[in-house]
Amino acid sequence: MGLISGTLLSSNKELLSTIPIMLLIIPALNSLVGDISTVLVSRLTTHLYIGTLLPKIQKSDRLKEDFYGLIITLLLSLGALLILGYLMGALTGIGIVNPIFMIFIITITILLIFFIMFITLFFGAIFLFKRGKDPNNFLIPFVTSLADFLTPFFLILFIIIFI
């Protein structure tokens, strides 16, 4: 996955260099998505082991609480990251092209990735738990690789679509 992600980034170097602020915040966005998703895997696994979440694909109040808590955390972290990114861009002289547009692109990218991760990790945790495997051992490395690939992929895709 890392090889594919690196190839994707290097093949779109010219596009990303036209929006230098993206180059500044892509690593932080990868980290943000990976960190939130890792917390999600841990929460799902804990709920499955202590029995507050049944190993069935169904809605539950516990799952909704985790979803809302993580989405609020994600949005607050994203806000702080955007403020820091733009502050660093201004301090270093990096050109900031259309800040509202960039915030829109980054926000829809992060929200889409979170929804993909939430669904994928929920199904993966249930599947692995039913087979007697510890979801943490499989899903945490998987989520890191997937986040490293999806973040630049969707950023580049949305920049191409909306520019």
Image (spheres, grey):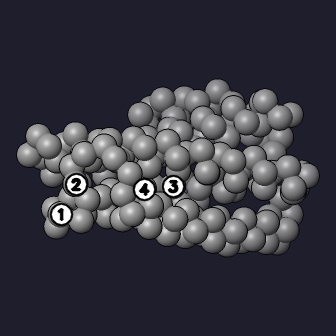
Image disc number at residue 54: 2
Q: Marks 4/1: CA distance?
A: 21 Å
Q: Is residue 154 left or right of residue 7?
A: right
**x, y percent for residue 90:** 85, 68
The residue type indicated by label 3 comes to: Val
CA–CA distance in space, label 4 to label 2? 20 Å
| Comes first in the chain, label 2 or label 3 | 3
Q: Please give the label number shown on residue 37.
A: 4
Q: Which mark is residue 33?
A: 3
Q: Amino acid at mark 2?
A: Leu
Q: Which residue is mark 1?
A: 51
- Residue at 87% across, 57% down: 99
Along the line of sight, which residue is nearer the eye, 133 or 156?
133
Q: Are marks 1 and 2 in contact (CB under 8 Å)?
A: yes
Horizontally, is 90 left or right of 109 in the view? Answer: right
Q: What kind of residue is marked 4? A: Ser
Q: CA distance from mark 3 to mark 4?
A: 6 Å
Q: What residue is drawn where x is 49% and y is 69%?
A: 69
Residue shown at 69% from the left, 48% from the top = 108
Q: In the structure shown, which secondary structural element does the residue marked by tag 1 occupy?
A: loop
